[in-house]
Image (spheres, rainbow, N blue to C red):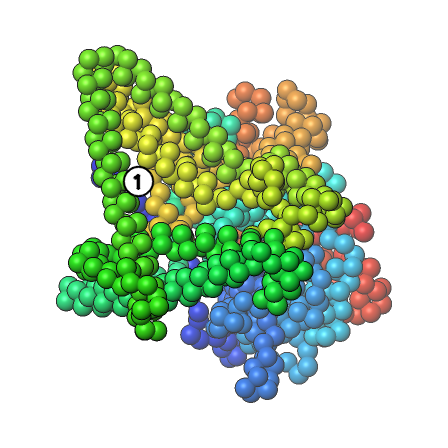
């Protein structure tokens, strides 16, 4: 396909794995450590954010992954945690998360990750952690999860106490003042929550959850691109898919309307994103002209040498077959008047089953000699023909009795060479005759076109339509041959089953007839009907491809003649114009608004993101697109503001009116582009006309939860309300929980 030079160079984004780190995670200065300062840990399924609450931001942010790597050279098993898994490619490939979906399932990993966290925070302890702890948990955390947390913190680390809280409420607490009323939309890695807040207290009985987050969106994009490019040469990692989701997907302002014209070629240039996976390109070294010339000469000499060797072998085989034919011909003459019993005995001693087998072999030998002479015609060149034409073949006229043994062999060779020369002369005459006939046909067609242009055009158009129709049928047949569930494949299997059934019956024809290879048990092909079945069963895909290619060449030739002589036949009427890639919706979807070169290594390693850019984030508003039987963000917010707290569909209550003025979007998945603008549009649609509302999004929503924990811990009175000491745990057990404004409550247990 030709490139359009008027278009700007294609912008390609390279999606690579994160670079390997040269240094491990740094440790905090032990001199700055204070045993009385609480430690806040946002233990998320994607990242862990940890630090002392007297800091502005967490001092350590690392991925929540762990690897136990066995070094066979050192005979040691080493553990890598967090960012340290990026020190080595093999270590990173084996890293795992303690989470299975939204739940923690590997608590051994949790213990090691917490030890890694305290160690890097510079905690000085004698077998325990002296600092109070704050840890996040998801909305409606099961009792088993909190019980395991108690065991890890109190029994493994001997912590003095811990306070748990919901990450979304911590984030809301950071972004608003104390005892504030509002609505928080928490977009996390594993789920999305909508929680009403009244006077700083989360109303958990009216909170709703969508089982969709950043992790599910990444998996959804992975599945879409895997189906879109099933034969992509490289397997991408989860990090690469997450990078594509975070960097190039966005929430559409009006999904249905934008989707209708997304694949329009006029606008797709600006919407289509091309990503390329790094690969090692094999570059062949460029040879000089002298090297190419020497290489060509070597190939030429090698070809001549092989031709001479092949020619000599053909002559030797022909001589051997001539001798064999002459011998068996003499045997046939000698056995003419002999009794059948003696004939059978002689033939069996010679390796034949019976007289019929002997005649069959003799016939095949004569046929093989004719084919060998024909093959000799194609193998010899013009120089050999001139040499042989000068040869008088003088030994052919002398009887064998008057010749020596060497002269007899030379005579047989001359007989073969003479037969080859005559065959070549005959083929040359036939070729010249065919060229003459073709020239006469061209003259007649030109005269026909000059005398009856309309009739000529009508005939050519009819022929063109017939070829196009036939080519479509052959293409359809080729595609059906590749599909084992097609009707053609089913018929082929039925024919095979029928043949197998007939061959097992052992009919009389099977016992009476034999094939060319002298196998009396194999009679397939003796009847013409067998070959009809054979053609149905074993249609050669390669031959069909060649036929389709020949039809295409003939179609192009006819179109060229019509373009030259038919004033009503234009470029738009040609077959290539009708199947232009610009008119193919599938091409635009797979390869974007540019022609595709399948031989280009770079284009083979490229993916085109277009519809997926808006389809994946749209699941937040239409969960049914991702297979979730739930309501979206807009519906949940509408239900909270217009269906609860004494509000009606036409009028907000004082409480919901305050909520609509203080809506906060938080969580790591809130960073997807266009989310806030879409929520503003949805609120404008379902709120009564003129209702004031405010949709807020912080600069870095993924840190809001940790900053809210730090703010919560600085208020000692509120912090002590949710603080559970080790003594209380030992006295009341793992079921014990202290309720506070930003945490879960016993109702969920």
Could you tell me residue 599's position as x and y percent?
35, 50
Q: Is residue 321 visible?
A: no
Could you tell me residue 611's position as x and y percent?
47, 37
Could you tell me residue 309's position as x and y percent?
32, 68
Left or right for 81, reference 289: right
The answer to whether 320 is drawn above or below residue 445 in the figure is: below
Between residue 436 and residue 651, name the one nearer to us: 436
The answer to whether 706 is drawn above or below residue 509 in the figure is: below
**Which residue is farthest bottom?**
74
Q: Residue at x 70, y 31 (%)?
A: 645
Between residue 201 and residue 433, name the one nearer to us: 433
> Which of the 4 image quarters holds residue 441?
top left
Residue that label 1 marks: 1
> Which of the 4 image quarters holds residue 618?
top right
Q: Residue at x 44, y 61 (%)?
A: 326
Left or right for 362, reference 6: right
> Which of the 4 image quarters holds residue 336?
bottom right
Q: Is residue 22 visible?
A: yes
Between residue 24 and residue 414, name the one nearer to us: 414
């Amino acid at each position: 396909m030709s490139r359009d030079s008027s278009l700007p160079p294609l912008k390609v984004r390279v999606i690579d794995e994160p670079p390997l780190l040269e240094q491990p995670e740094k440790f905090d200065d032990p001199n700055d450590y204070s045993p009385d300062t609480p430690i806040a840990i946002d233990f998320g399924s994607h990242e862990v954010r940890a630090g002392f609450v007297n800091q502005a931001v967490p001092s350590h942010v690392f991925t929540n992954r762990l690897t136990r790597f066995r070094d066979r050279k050192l005979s040691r098993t080493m553990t890598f945690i967090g960012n340290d898994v990026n020190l080595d490619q093999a270590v990173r490939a084996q890293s795992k998360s303690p989470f299975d979906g939204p739940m923690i399932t590997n608590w051994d990993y949790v213990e090691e990750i917490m030890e890694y966290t305290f160690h890097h925070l510079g905690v000085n302890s004698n077998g325990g952690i002296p600092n109070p702890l704050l840890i996040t948990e998801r909305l409606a955390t099961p009792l088993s999860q909190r019980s395991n947390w108690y065991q890890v913190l109190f029994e493994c680390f001997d912590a003095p106490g811990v306070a748990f809280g919901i990450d979304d409420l911590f984030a809301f607490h950071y972004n608003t003042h104390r005892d504030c009323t509002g609505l928080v939309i928490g977009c996390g890695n594993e789920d999305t929550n909508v929680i009403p807040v009244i006077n700083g207290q989360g109303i958990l009985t009216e909170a709703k959850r969508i089982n969709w987050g950043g992790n599910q969106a990444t998996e959804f994009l992975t599945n879409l691109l895997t189906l879109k490019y099933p034969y992509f040469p490289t397997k991408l990692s989860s990090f690469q898919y997450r990078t594509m989701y975070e960097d190039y997907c966005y929430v559409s302002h009006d999904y249905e309307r934008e989707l209708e014209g997304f694949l329009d070629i006029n606008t797709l240039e600006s919407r289509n994103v091309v990503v390329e996976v790094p690969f090692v390109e094999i570059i062949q070294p460029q040879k000089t002209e002298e090297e190419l010339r020497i290489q060509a000469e070597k190939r030429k000499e090698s070809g001549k040498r092989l031709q001479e060797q092949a020619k000599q072998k053909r002559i030797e085989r022909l001589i051997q077959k001539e001798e064999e034919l002459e011998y068996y011909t003499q045997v046939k003459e000698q056995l003419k008047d002999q009794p059948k019993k003696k004939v059978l005995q002689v033939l069996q001693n010679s390796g034949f089953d019976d007289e019929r087998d002997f005649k069959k072999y003799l016939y095949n030998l004569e046929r093989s000699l004719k084919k060998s002479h024909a093959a000799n015609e194609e193998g010899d060149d013009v120089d050999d023909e001139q040499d042989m034409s000068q040869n008088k073949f003088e030994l052919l006229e002398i009887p064998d009795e008057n010749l020596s043994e060497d002269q007899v062999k030379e005579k047989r060779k001359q007989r073969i060479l003479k037969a080859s020369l005559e065959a070549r002369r005959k083929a040359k005459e036939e070729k010249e005759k065919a060229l003459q006939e073709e020239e006469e046909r061209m003259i007649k067609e030109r005269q026909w076109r000059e005398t009856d242009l309309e009739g000529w055009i009508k005939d050519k158009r009819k022929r063109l339509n017939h070829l196009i129709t036939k080519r479509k049928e052959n293409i359809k047949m080729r595609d059906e041959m590749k599909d084992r569930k097609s009707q053609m494949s089913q018929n082929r299997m039925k024919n095979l089953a029928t043949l197998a059934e007939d061959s097992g019956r052992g009919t009389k024809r099977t016992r009476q007839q034999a094939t060319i290879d002298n196998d009396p048990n194999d009679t397939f092909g003796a009847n013409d009907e067998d070959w009809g079945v054979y053609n149905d069963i074993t249609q050669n895909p390669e031959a069909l491809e060649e036929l389709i290619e020949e039809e295409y060449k003939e179609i192009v030739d006819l179109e060229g003649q019509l373009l030259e002589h038919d004033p009503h036949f234009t470029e738009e009427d040609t077959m290539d114009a009708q199947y232009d890639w610009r008119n193919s919706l599938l091409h635009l979807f797979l390869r974007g608004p540019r022609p595709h070169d399948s031989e280009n290594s770079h284009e083979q390693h490229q993916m085109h993101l277009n519809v997926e850019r808006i389809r994946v984030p749209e699941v937040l508003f239409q969960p049914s697109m991702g297979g979730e039987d739930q309501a979206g963000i807009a519906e949940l917010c509408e239900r909270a503001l217009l269906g609860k707290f004494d509000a009606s569909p036409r009028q907000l209550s004082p409480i919901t009116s305050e909520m609509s003025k203080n809506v906060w979007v938080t969580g790591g998945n809130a960073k997807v582009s266009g989310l806030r603008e879409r929520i503003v549009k949805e609120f404008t649609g379902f709120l009564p006309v003129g209702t004031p509302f405010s949709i807020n999004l912080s600069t870095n929503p993924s840190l809001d939860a940790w900053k809210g924990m730090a703010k919560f811990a600085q208020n000692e009175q509120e912090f002590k309300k949710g603080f559970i000491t080790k003594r209380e745990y030992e006295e009341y057990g793992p079921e014990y929980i202290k309720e506070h404004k930003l945490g879960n409550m016993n109702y969920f247990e």
